[in-house]
């Protein structure tokens, strides 16, 4: 694919071969992301695959490209058009119909069928596509029904409602349009490729949008539904990423941060592979240790846990293979994890899911919370077992109501935050005597910036009770910030986007996350935010974790940046 610019009314090539692909190409369309302004090209291949390429400028000003993801339809796609306002990509599969994909590079790749041949509003082959946005904010999608020489119209704002169809008859010396192929909209006109132009060669016909608007009542269409709250989301870039986990599919899940006792730059990211085990990574993203202990779902870390005549640093994880609580000691010198559970510590749950730890400010006791997919939450106290090992004793249980995974406990205030995925973020008491009383912090109905599932949640500790709560809004690939202090006011949301120059993609579909305010060396002077990346693209690899220096987030919202808080204190 080559690049061109318009100069003095003429197309002038900028350079050869911006994109090189081995696929046999059938068509393409361009797209500019409304999130970060990045440019993309969608290339349609004869195999039914749609390649999305990022187009960026190199240091020398030359354009360069990077394959970011692949989409798929069942057979050969012919035409596409991208909506840079609403993140829609429309693709025609000529024997099937019109598909819609989310054009955001971090979005889900599952398409939606807009209209279909035979059983919908197409009589045969589906042709070109075009988009038109009216001055009042309505968006109309045009699609060619080639065999009937008709053009179908759809109201994008009203869930792609079929508006009607029209044909274009000749007038005067201009013949009508037959078997319209490619379409394009702009400058107040709809342009149609007339593939049956009588005895003459194929040409293009122009139809005034005003004429179409009058005929189909565009002014009566549903207006754009208010302001998109995601348009105000801050955008931050990661500084590094971890190595991918060993297993494919939905595997990486939840991170926790371990702080080295003397050299914070030697701290580790502990992350779960819920298909097989538990990782630790150094702060350059390399694997430090991997324990193949089973389907470990969530993990958390605490310091100063009494173990005989000494204090231990521990990592605790929910194990779905053994339906157990896994307990590991982290060696302060090497950062290596060793199993110190006093035998199998059963949860008596058929599918132990989310997990978080809590150290009581009342007596220093350490507790484990685990929730299950049906909404059950159980709490255990960690006690000394035999031979320098730890055991668990159940002290409490309560019902959230439906599936909950993400949770975090505030060791200063005694609060427990639980994300009920489709419902709300709740605040409970973390002490074993606190019962099931709760307070709603937020939900997607009250806050349109949230979109379920609500997943990972963590705390950025500030001075005293100051700081912030961060929550994964998985449905729109974002992270919401709230004040740590009551009434936990919403601050804003951010997304982690790609750093093309560094070759690191953004994060999306995040399950677990963690955040810390402790300085971790020169690259993380105010702490770090870590997020599981559910779609690790560009290049396409197994899931991993993305790391963002806290100042990149804090500066977007004018938030505090702390340097004195250490979880070991």
Image (cartoon, grey):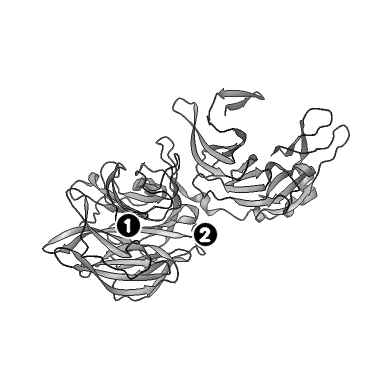
Q: Can see residue 467?
A: no
Q: Which residue is mark 1?
A: 294
First-in-chain label (2 vs 1): 1
Q: Residue at image x 57%, y 53%?
A: 227
Please identify the quarter of the rendering in which residue 186 is found: top right
The kind of secondary structure element at disc 1 is loop
* Left or right of residue 525, residue 232 in this image: right
Residue nearest the observer in this picture, 431 or 233: 431
Q: Can see residue 178?
A: yes
Q: Residue at image x 16%, y 64%?
A: 306
Q: Is residue 513 above or below residue 387?
A: above
Q: Residue furthest right?
A: 172
**Spatial separation of the CA atoms under disc 2 and disc 1:** 38 Å
The image shows residue 558 at horizontal and vertical percentages of 39, 50
Q: Is residue 188 above or below residue 482?
A: above
Q: Name the quadrant of the N terminus.
A: top right
The image shows residue 209 at horizontal and vertical percentages of 75, 42
Q: Is the Cβ of the residue at disc 2 closer than 8 Å to that at disc 1?
A: no
Query: So how many labels did they put on this image?
Result: 2
**Labelled disc at residue 448:** 2
The image shows residue 240 at horizontal and vertical percentages of 35, 42
- Sort mark 2 into few (<14), some (14-19) or many (20+) by Cα contacts within 10 Å: few
* Left or right of residue 515, residue 498 in this image: right
* Left or right of residue 207, residue 245 in this image: left
Q: Is residue 345 above or below residue 72?
A: below
Foreground mark, 2 or 1? 1
């Amino acid at each position: 694919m080559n690049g061109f610019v318009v100069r003095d009314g003429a197309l002038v090539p900028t350079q050869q071969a911006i994109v090189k692909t081995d696929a046999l190409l059938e068509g393409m369309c361009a797209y500019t992301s409304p999130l970060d302004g990045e440019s993309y090209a969608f290339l349609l291949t004869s195999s039914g695959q749609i390649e999305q390429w990022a187009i960026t400028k190199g240091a020398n000003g030359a354009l360069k490209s990077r394959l970011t993801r692949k989409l798929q339809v069942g057979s050969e796609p012919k035409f596409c058009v991208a909506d840079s306002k609403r993140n829609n990509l429309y693709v025609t599969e000529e024997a099937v119909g019109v598909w819609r994909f989310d054009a955001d590079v971090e979005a889900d790749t599952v398409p939606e069928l807009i209209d279909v041949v035979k059983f919908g509003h197409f009589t045969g082959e589906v042709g070109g596509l075009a988009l038109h946005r009216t001055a009042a904010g309505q968006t109309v999608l045009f699609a060619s029904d080639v065999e009937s020489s008709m053009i179908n119209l759809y109201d994008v704002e009203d869930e792609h409602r079929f508006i009607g169809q029209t044909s274009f008859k000749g007038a005067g010396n201009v013949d009508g349009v037959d078997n319209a192929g490619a379409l394009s909209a702009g400058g107040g006109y709809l342009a149609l490729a007339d593939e049956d132009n009588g005895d003459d060669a194929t040409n293009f016909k122009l139809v005034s949008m005003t004429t179409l608007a009058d005929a189909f009542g565009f002014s009566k269409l549903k207006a754009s539904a208010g302001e998109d709250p995601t348009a105000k989301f801050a955008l931050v870039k990661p500084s590094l990423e971890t190595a991918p986990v060993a297993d494919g599919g939905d595997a990486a899940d939840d991170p926790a941060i371990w702080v080295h006792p003397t050299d914070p730059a030697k701290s580790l990211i502990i992350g779960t592979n819920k298909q097989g085990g538990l990782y630790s990574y150094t702060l350059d993203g390399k694997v430090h240790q991997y324990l193949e202990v089973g389907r470990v779902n969530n993990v958390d870390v605490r310091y100063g846990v009494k173990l005989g005549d000494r204090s231990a640093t521990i990592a605790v994880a929910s194990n779905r293979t053994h339906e157990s609580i896994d307990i590991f000691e982290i060696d302060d010198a090497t950062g290596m994890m060793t199993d110190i559970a006093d035998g199998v510590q059963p949860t008596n749950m058929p599918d132990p899911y989310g997990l978080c730890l809590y150290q009581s400010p009342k007596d220093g006791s350490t507790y484990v919370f685990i929730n299950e997919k049906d909404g059950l939450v159980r709490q255990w106290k960690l006690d000394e077992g035999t031979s320098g090992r730890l055991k668990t004793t159940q002290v409490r249980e309560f019902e959230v109501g439906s599936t909950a995974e993400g949770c975090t406990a505030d060791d200063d205030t005694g609060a427990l935050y639980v994300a009920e995925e489709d419902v709300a973020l709740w605040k409970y008491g973390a002490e074993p005597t606190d019962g099931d009383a709760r307070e709603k912090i937020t939900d997607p109905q009250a806050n349109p910036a949230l979109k379920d599932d609500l997943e990972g949640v963590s705390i950025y500790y500030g001075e005293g009770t100051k700081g912030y709560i961060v929550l994964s809004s998985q449905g729109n690939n974002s992270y919401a910030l709230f004040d740590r202090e009551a009434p936990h006011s919403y601050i804003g949301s951010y997304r982690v986007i790609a750093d093309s120059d560094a070759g690191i993609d953004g994060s999306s579909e995040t399950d677990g996350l963690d955040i810390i305010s402790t300085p971790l060396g020169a690259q993380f002077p105010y702490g770090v935010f870590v997020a599981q990346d559910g779609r690790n693209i560009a290049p396409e690899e197994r899931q991993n974790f993305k790391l963002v220096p806290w100042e990149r987030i804090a500066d977007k919202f004018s938030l505090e940046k702390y340097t004195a808080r250490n979880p070991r204190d």
